[in-house]
Image (tube, rainbow, N blue to C red):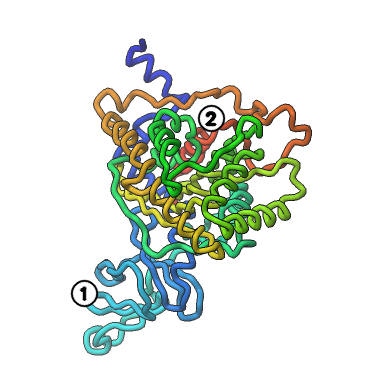
Amino acid sequence: MSTLDEAIGQAHRSVNPLAFSRDWYRRELERVFRRSWMFVAHDSLIPSNSDYVVSYMAEDPVIVQRGRDGKIRVYLNRCRHRGNLLCVHDRGNTPAFVCSYHAWTYTDGKLTGVPSIRDFYHGEIDRSKLGLVEAKVEVYGGLIFACWDANAVSLNDYLGDGRWWLDHFLLREELGGLEVIPCQQRYIVPVNWKLPAENFGGDYFHFAATHGSVIDALAQTDDKRIAATGATTAKADKPHYFSVAANYGRGAAHGFYEVSTGQAPRNQELALAQRLGPEAVEWFHERERLLNEKLKALPQRPYSFHVANIFPNFALVGAGSAFYGKGLIVHHPRGPNRTEAWVWCAVEKNAPAIVKKQQRFVLMQRQAAAGLVAPDDHENFERISETIDTGVGRHVPFHYEMAIGHDDDDPLPKEWKDRPNWPGKIGPRVSEINQRDFYRHWNTLMETGDEE
């Protein structure tokens, strides 16, 4: 038993619930989100010139458009005249956006039309200074990122160690890359955005307790679409699992977990491929052949990671299986205790139709708002949120001290004679290294201040 004073005295070693308060949330919008690279869309959603989709960067609505010149740009979705929402459609194709209020018109971000400009403005308005507010944009393997900070590091530097994991186990450009199914599932959860972000970034500890019923259901079903992957000789194959803190101790903190090695995950995947048919088996073997060729110099090759979070709020799920749709999930902040999740399903572009069908099904069956897995997490997040800002509760810190003095312990099996040179900080499967590093970077941004 602890007194309130004793609990408060531990705050310096953990995360203070005040980090989830309204005052700190307003500071986050300025200091965290304005400085970070944020995922806004995938380039397969805007294949043609003048195609666009709308998205968000934190609370700010944006337009993601491939211009008439083929260049991808991201604009604040706000007319420069009275601040009206400029584009009210989710996606489409247009060379110009016309504001519904006073018909100011923008082409490739430039203000190209103002009604009766000579009569009403006497020709004295400088349109060159009234274009749409534009973010920095970089595209990585089809993933479109944007950032408001003109002085931000390059996206390559921001992703850092994470690039290796994305290149080899998610983007798979040697296979033709990803394509995203148009439109996304959207839902609101009454929680702070950091709760799902830190969960996707490294919390395997919760899985057995939170998703135990899911594990049982998948093991017992006879529906081959729903069943867990096929029979495995896991014990004989000695699978190993790890977590990875990309950019550990420096820069943006990206977390990857369920990094699997050994023959067991391959046997599971092959068993599922055999259920789907010869096309799936051939595809699985080709995926493995190409990745083995790329990583043949590694003494221990990961099969994949399965779940990740790219700081601050871009979550990934499904990368650990050839037959699981790749979930591209953004947890848009909508207030200190409100998050809007956008879930896109990406499939491997050149996969056989039967594989794409399976990928779509599994992602939605697991991660949809009414899926088997996601609601379990949301219920926990909501329960946390109910006590996070109460009179006494707001002073009692969370606990992130699992094995806190053992971050530098070697989690790799002793029988591995050659140590793999994987990028990032390799941790055990169950760890809070990634969560601590998430809040390390978050705290750095919050304390740095805004010079503007």
- Tell me the tag on residue 430: 2
The quadrant of the picture occupied by the N terminus is: top left
Q: Position of residue 429 (x, y in %)?
A: 56, 32
Q: Give how far across and how far down residue 75 sits, in percent.
A: 40, 67
Point out which mark residue 330 bears.
none
How many numbered markers are drawn?
A: 2
Whether label 1 touches label 2, CB < 8 Å: no
Q: Is residue 197 visible?
A: yes
From the image, state whether disc 1 or disc 2 is nearer to you: 2
Position of residue 341 relative to residue 138, above or below, is above
Residue placed at 40% from the left, 77% from the top? 110
Residue 154 in view in this figure? no
Residue 430 pos. (x, y %): 53, 30
Q: Residue furthest top?
A: 1
Q: Earlier in the sequence, mark 1 or mark 2?
A: 1
Q: Which residue is mark 1?
A: 101
Say which amino acid is labelled 2.
Val
Would residue 273 appear left or right of 398 to someone viewing this image?
Answer: right
Position above or below: 260 against 359: above
Q: Within 10 Å of the Cα at label 2, are there few (<14), some (14-19), or many (20+) other Cα atoms?
A: some
What is the C-alpha distance between the residues marked 1 and 2? Answer: 54 Å
Furthest residue in direction bottom, as rendered = 118
Please name the amino acid that badge 1 sits on.
Answer: Tyr
In the rendered structure, the answer to whether residue 346 lies left or right of residue 112 reads right
Q: Secondary structure at mark 1?
A: loop
Residue 261: percent from left, percent from top: 64, 39
Residue shown at 69%/55% (left/top)? 289
Instruction: Give me the residue at 66% from left, 40% from top.
Output: 263
